[in-house]
Amino acid sequence: MADMEHPDRIFLRDHVISAEIGAFQSERGLEQRLRFNLTVDLRDGVADSGDHVDHVLSYDVLTQAVDTALADQRYNLVETLAERIAAEVLAHPRAARIDVSVEKLDRGPGALGVAIVRHRGRVPATGVPAHVSILVHAPGAPLPEGAVVIVPGTDAVATDGPHARRLALLALDQAAWRLGGALGIEVAETRTELDAAIQRRQPVIWAPTRLAADAADAGNVPDSLALWLADRLGAHHIDFAGADDRSLPAVPDGMSISVARLRTD
């Protein structure tokens, strides 16, 4: 075991990637340079590895954590991005503690950013259990036990124009909060919140705008959003609540679907 007062560490320094990020309108549609520095305290010392690559925390875990976090969503805040990276690395059993700094290099005369320190066990791991399922909700739909992400259903938003998709997503957000209040279930807007509820094996209602607004392939209706989210979470099942003769969309291999039969009396 490593000395907890003076642990062995691995690090990634001055890793620069261009990505779209930022809360201001001037930052939308444009990439800017981000610099990442990660330092990880190891649970076990490097002397315990026996010079075997499978017995150490690979440097690839650090670069992949950055890539995975950036691929997961568009971020308004570097703080949220740093949290996501920390959670990815600390999900690895050989990581005990991480320092993460994320800096914007193109927003001022110098670097602007955030530095955080997180310990294993204090952030939710992002590994999603195989039993998570997705439910596209309709009034009267039964709620399954355990880890389930509920995608709210709502009437179609009759609008067109350049903002039609965002208005449709916002309508689903409103439906999520109404449903959460009616059922007494938490509403999640971020991947971190979804992961935490799944790890606790608790149902959660998804408000999709924050994650899906910049993912055109997610669509803007509950069915397409459910498929998109299921693929991102590695969910094993989707329930499409509605009429028995509902036309079911195609799903990836390894995922099952069904229609929840609702009583109409």
Image (cartoon, rainbow, N blue to C red):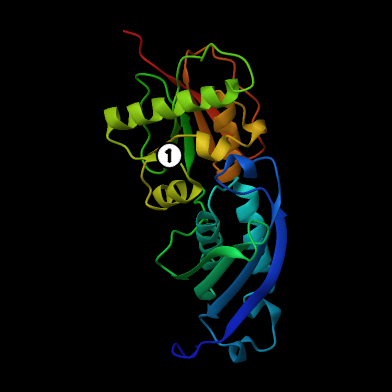
Q: Position of residue 108 (x, y in %)?
A: 63, 59
Q: Is residue 240 left or right of residue 69?
A: left
Q: Residue at x 51, y 87 (%)?
A: 7
Q: Position of residue 221 (x, y in %)?
A: 55, 23
The residue that appears at 56% across and 25% down in the rendered structure is: 223
- Along the line of sight, which residue is nearer the eye, 71 or 51? 71
Q: Amino acid at mark 1?
A: Val
Q: Is residue 212 above or below residue 36?
A: above
Residue 81's place in the image compared with 236, above or below, is below
- Is residue 78 or residue 228 the one in the foreground? 78
Q: Is residue 207 found left or right of 202 in the rendered image?
A: right
Q: Position of residue 231 (x, y in %)?
A: 61, 40
| Quadrant of the rendered image containing residue 57 | bottom right
Taking the image as shown, residue 110 lies to the left or right of residue 222, namely right
Around disc 1, counting alpha carbons within 10 Å, would you say few (fewer than 14), some (14 to 19), or many (20 or more)?
A: many
How many marks overall? 1
**For the residue labelled by badge 1, is the local secondary structure a helix, a strand or a loop?**
strand
Can you say which quadrant of the picture contains the C terminus? top left
In the rendered image of this protein, does residue 74 appear above or below residue 154? Answer: below
Task: State the image coordinates of residue 60 (x, y, percent, origin top left).
Answer: 69, 69
Instruction: Pick the residue in front: 217 or 259.
Output: 217
The residue indicated by pointer 1 is 148
Identify the residue at the far top of this view. Answer: 265
**Location of residue 38 (image quadrant):** bottom right
- Residue 58 visible in the snapshot: no
**Left or right, 125 with reference to 197:** right
Residue 190, relative to residue 96: is it above or below?
above
Q: Nearer the viewer, residue 210 or 4?
A: 210
- Is residue 183 visible in the rendered image? The answer is yes
Q: Residue at x 60, y 35 (%)?
A: 228
